[in-house]
Image: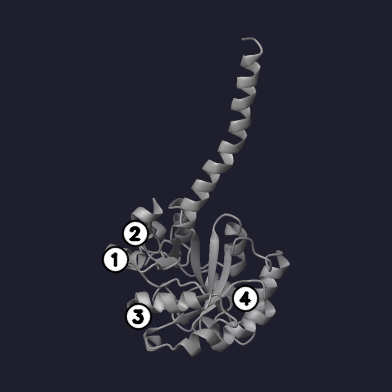
Amino acid sequence: MRRIFPIILMGVVFLSLFETPVFAMKENFSKQQGVANIAHRGASAHAPENTMAAFEKAVDMKADYIEIDVQMTEDEELIAIHDTTLNRTTDGRGFVGDFTLEEIRVLDAGSWFGEEFAGEQIPTFEEVIDAYRGKIGILIELKSPELYPGIEGKVADVLIERNMQHPQNEKIIIQSFNHESMQVSKELLPNVPHGVLAGMTWAGVTNGQLAEFATYADYFNPNMNIVTDELVARVHATGMDIYPYTVRVQAEADRLFNLDVDGIITDYPEYVYKHPANN
């Protein structure tokens, strides 16, 4: 009996060595079946878009990515703002590119959303990158890059300075509606995944056009209203993933889940986590 007990104990230890990887594999497999949760301009249903408050809220809500819009000031500084004018989301007036960073930094980018956000600033691109790299994925949209010659190089410089030109787990993605800009950016950052954004006019995108996108893009990210199961299948056939935008209703999130998309860009991260596939 004394000899048998050590043998049994050794057997239990031996089996336990294999159990942990099996459980870990199951857990990882489960996560892989989920849909990427991309907080549009941060958790913009809960805090003023493209502010640190919105990005922090997205982290708190455990989104997989924050999506940020990048433009350039008159003195060629990169900032996070969606509209090409300051009118809607700040107390300023005029085009973003007509103001210096110093002038933009004194603007209130939070009061329009709620009194509790009074004094929120427009953050610089560098501030966002430094605050959230390694903490959450960052989907970088170059907004109207045709207005800002050289913006692709400026963004590349920021990432390269931080040794982020070789991202792990595709946690940095660059996208734009300007597809020529994405070709330029891909040449500068060949190891960084890129995406092409597609509005309603791309409802009839052909297989040939998708194949062309796939020569420099890793994602085809369309308006959610043109997404069908047939489109998803064709995008996947080219080797690209698909992240539709912008979900603001739970029913639309559910529809996209059922179409087998890879990610959902949403103002409401909670709508993505409510789906059984992500629980």
Q: Residue 226 carries which label?
A: 3
Q: Which callout, 1 or 4, points at the residue further toward the start of the chain? A: 4
Q: Badge 2 local density, few (<14 within 10 Å), some, or many (20+)?
A: some
Q: Earlier in the sequence, mark 2 or mark 4?
A: 4
Q: Which scheme is used to colour this image of the protein?
A: one colour
Which of the two labelled residues, at mark 1 and mark 3, occupies the earlier sequence position? 3
Q: Is residue 49 left or right of residue 181?
A: left
Q: Residue at x 37, y 71 (%)?
A: 246
User: How far from the left and from the top, in percent, is residue 3?
Assistant: 66, 13
The answer to whether mark 1 and mark 4 are in CB contact below 8 A is no
Sequence order check, earlier mark of 3 and 2: 3
* Residue sitting at x 60%, y 59%: 133
Number of the label disc, if any, that sits on residue 249: 1
Query: In the displayed structure, would residue 204 be above or below residue 156?
Result: below
Helix, strand or loop under label 4: loop
Q: Observer-nearest residue: 46 or 216?
A: 216
Q: Which amino acid does label 2 sit on?
A: Tyr
Q: Residue at the location (52% across, 41% down)?
A: 23
- Circle 3 packing at 10 Å, graded few (<14), some (14-19), many (20+), is some
Q: Earlier in the sequence, mark 1 or mark 2?
A: 1
Mark 4 lies on residue: 77
Q: Quickly name the residue at label 2.
A: 271
Residue 142 visible somewhere in the drawing? no
Determine the CA span between mark 1 and mark 2. Answer: 8 Å
- In this view, 156 is above or below 31: below
Q: Where is residue 95 in the image (x, y as percent from the top left)?
A: 48, 84
For the residues labelled 1 and 4, the Cα–Cα distance comes to 35 Å
